[in-house]
Image (tube, grey):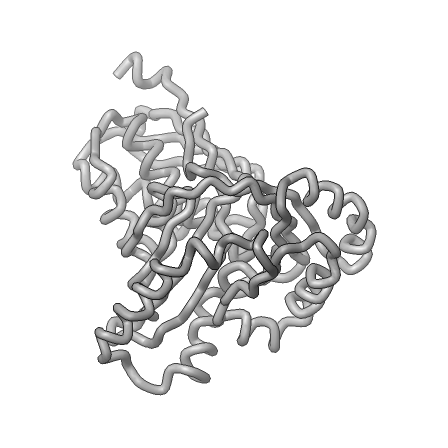
């Protein structure tokens, strides 16, 4: 315990964007059946973990807009792992927040997965990846994706994952109004009320949609062949209700070197894809004032082959 108490673990916890988000329909368990492609990007939070002797989880952060109590996904993840492992250890956790909150970038889900991975190592639990994914799925639908990260097909409510072995050099520009956030639960509810008038019963249809995405995802992600529209069903709801999203998509559509553009997740963050990061940086430099004058924060990112990593 003496040696463990001195150990500090630092983890890089990346955001994600959706390169495909299809809502197949409403399930009887209250969730929605989804078919997605999720991709990690190098906009990252950082988490530091250290054992404490008090047997409790203490969370601190440089972000004043976050609850640090039991409702925080980091604290929930840590307590779930303690309960599962039946251990007496506690942990001091510090979150350096860079991923905006309520942005459709799944920063909270990434932090939750990073906590499971970080404390598994800090507490020397040796829990296998499959079990970590199972624990993650009880905490939230996006969280299992981050256990492996990179780029993956995501089915079911997000917990059925199929790793894709792709290495993209694309650059990405993100736009988000810092004063706007969107409730994921509320967006799915609105989508469901408008488009899902009955529960799914046709398993063959679900499997056909999954197969179609498996078979075509490589072609659909080869943006350089021609401009492709990224499918995001939730954009149908959010773009109509949210002027910030509508304006961001318009601005991104006018960028001369953009290969494709879309909203991520339930928004309001929107993104455009470029052939490489240098092109994205040049485009941002030329348009930074325009974005800022319209109320947007902006970032340049790249696609990541891996997700959560130790530093």
- Which quadrant of the figure contains the C terminus? top left
Can residue 178 be seen here? no
Residue at position x 34%, y 41% in the image: 148
Closer to the camera in the image, 249 or 110: 249
Closer to the camera in the image, 273 or 143: 273
Does 207 sit above or below residue 198?
above
Can residue 153 be seen here? yes
Residue at position x 56%, y 72% in the image: 238
Closer to the camera in the image, 90 or 119: 119
Residue 119 falls in which quadrant of the image?
top left
Does 306 sit above or below residue 235?
above
Residue that protrudes farthest toward the top in the picture = 3
- What count of labels does the image hold? 0
Residue at position x 50%, y 67% in the image: 232
Residue that protrudes farthest toward the bottom in the picture = 197
Residue that protrudes farthest toward the left in the picture = 86
Residue 45 percent coordinates (x, y): 52, 38
Residue 178 falls in which quadrant of the image?
bottom right
- Which quadrant of the figure contains the N terminus? top left
Residue 278 percent coordinates (x, y): 68, 38
Q: Is residue 102 left or right of residue 200?
A: right
Closer to the camera in the image, 6 or 113: 113
Q: Is residue 287 left or right of residue 57?
A: right
Residue 135 percent coordinates (x, y): 25, 47
Q: Is residue 16 left or right of residue 123?
A: right
Residue 247 percent coordinates (x, y): 71, 67
Residue at position x 82%, y 50% in the image: 289
């Amino acid at each position: 315990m003496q040696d463990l108490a001195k150990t500090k673990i630092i983890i890089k916890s990346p955001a994600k964007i959706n390169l495909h988000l299809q809502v197949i329909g409403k399930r009887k368990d209250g969730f929605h059946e989804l078919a997605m492609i999720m991709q990690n990007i190098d906009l990252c939070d950082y988490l530091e973990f250290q054992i404490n002797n008090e047997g409790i989880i203490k969370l601190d952060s440089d972000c004043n807009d976050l609850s640090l109590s039991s409702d925080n996904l980091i604290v929930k993840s840590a307590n779930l792992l303690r309960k599962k492992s039946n251990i007496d250890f506690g942990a001091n956790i510090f979150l350096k927040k860079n991923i905006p909150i309520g942005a459709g970038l799944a920063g909270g889900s990434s932090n939750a997965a990073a906590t499971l991975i970080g404390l598994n190592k800090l507490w020397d639990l040796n829990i296998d990846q499959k079990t970590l994914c199972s624990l993650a799925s009880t905490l939230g639908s996006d969280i299992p994706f981050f256990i492996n990260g990179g780029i993956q097909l995501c089915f079911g409510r997000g917990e059925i994952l199929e790793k894709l072995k792709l290495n993209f050099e694309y650059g990405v520009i993100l736009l988000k109004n810092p004063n706007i956030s969107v409730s994921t639960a509320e967006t799915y509810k609105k989508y469901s009320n408008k488009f899902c008038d009955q529960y799914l019963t046709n398993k063959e249809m679900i499997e056909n949609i999954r197969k179609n995405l498996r078979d075509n995802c490589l072609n659909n992600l080869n943006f350089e062949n021609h401009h492709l529209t990224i499918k995001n069903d939730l954009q149908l709801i959010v773009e109509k209700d949210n002027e910030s999203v509508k304006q961001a998509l318009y601005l991104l559509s006018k960028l001369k070197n953009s290969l494709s553009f879309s909203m991520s997740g339930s928004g309001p963050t929107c993104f455009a894809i470029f052939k490489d990061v240098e092109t994205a940086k040049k485009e941002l430099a030329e348009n930074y004032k325009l974005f800022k004058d319209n109320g947007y924060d902006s970032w340049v990112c790249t696609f990541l082959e891996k997700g959560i990593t130790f530093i």
